[in-house]
Image (spheres, grey):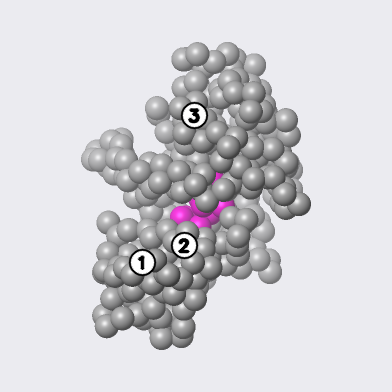
Amino acid sequence: MKKTIYIFSSGELKRKGNTLYFETEENKKYIPVEDVGEIMIFGEVDFNKKFLEFISVKEIILHYFNYNGYYMGSFYPREHLNSGYMILKQAEHYTDEQKRIELARRFVTGAGKNIRQVLKYYNNRDCDLEDGLSKIEELCSSIPTMQDISPLMALEGNMREQYYKCFDNICKNPDFVFEERSRRPPRNYMNTLISFGNVLMYTIVLSEIYKTHLDPRIGYLHATNFRRFTLNLDVAEIFKPIIIDRLIFSLIRKKMITKKDFDKNTEGILLKDKGKQTFIQQLDEKLKTTIKHRDIGREVSYRRLIRLELYKLAKHLMGEKEYEPFVANW
């Protein structure tokens, strides 16, 4: 599997011969281009058109984030797997209201069931989450009755709200109380971790979409409008609880990230570079971790799991097999 390269330093990234080369004031490093699947840039990095042409040929996506860790954009190379047929099928399922709401309900169902699994996991250990579990169950039971996107999104929002209220019981750390969801800027440490993790999840799913025939611009739960990408937001809903949220709980419970890893300024509360690096290092390990997939009967990594979800969606759009979202059983 190709690697994700994370760059926190400032320097110049360029093509050198037939490989990639990153130079800072202190270091010079060659990066074997055939091993790279995507590059995520957090530092101040210069590059030129020749470099962009090279990574485009090599089908490498480049994502960049600002100083505060917010996603700013992607260099999305010319789509090498683009398919007019698939775009038509995606559009058909978007413009047909019944087909769209059916897919949107399945994304929310997948998110809800994975939220329930996460809560069950911690409820069976040292956390009392019965109240949260029953509220999530009740909300999940209403998903099939939703006939429009707006109430479905409102229900999904309620589900997340109830879920987030359980975080304090799971983390048991007064430095990381949830309080309420706040974004841009996050107003406490927990919200900063949630926002940072979610942004990474969206970009990872985007990279995986690029390796399929699907077009990331056409989503179903999230409206396709002037936003560049929406399908990655839909699919990420399914994986955020079992990848990002579990990672956050682990980082806090093991004290791998503490309040010393944050900065407070006019932009809100932000992760320092060391905190970002710890988060990303653990996320990278998580994505490489393999699990036994009950449907295909073999070990797959979490990253591969995301790709398989996209293949299932493509089959649904082509009328081959109805899409059922992935639900963890651990």
Check disc 2 and give the amino acid type: Ser
Around disc 1, counting alpha carbons within 10 Å, would you say few (fewer than 14), some (14 to 19), or many (20 or more)?
few
Disc with the residue nearer the chain's start (2 vs 1) = 2
User: Do tag 2 and tag 3 residues touch (Cβ < 8 Å)?
Assistant: no
On the image, the x and y values in percent for residue 253 come to 50, 26
Residue appearing at x 52%, y 44% in the figure: 275
Residue annotated with mark 3: 255
Q: Find the distance from the CA under tag 2 to the CA under tag 1.
A: 10 Å
Q: The residue tagged with tag 1: helix, strand or loop? A: loop
Residue annotated with mark 2: 9
User: Do tag 1 and tag 3 residues touch (Cβ < 8 Å)?
Assistant: no
Report the mark closest to the observer, 2 or 3: 2
- Which residues lie in the magenta part? 197-207
Residue annotated with mark 1: 27
Disc with the residue nearer the chain's start (1 vs 3) = 1
Q: The residue tagged with tag 3: helix, strand or loop? A: loop
Check disc 3 and give the amino acid type: Lys
Q: The residue tagged with tag 2: helix, strand or loop? A: loop
Check disc 1 and give the amino acid type: Asn
Residue appearing at x 47%, y 44% in the figure: 279
Around disc 2, counting alpha carbons within 10 Å, would you say few (fewer than 14), some (14 to 19), or many (20 or more)?
some
Locate residue 290: give its quadrant: top left
Q: Residue 313 carries which label?
A: none
Q: Does the magenta stretch include residue 205?
A: yes
Q: Find the distance from the CA under tag 2 to the CA under tag 3.
A: 25 Å
Q: Using the image as rendered, state which of residue 95 and residue 261 is in the foreground.
A: 261
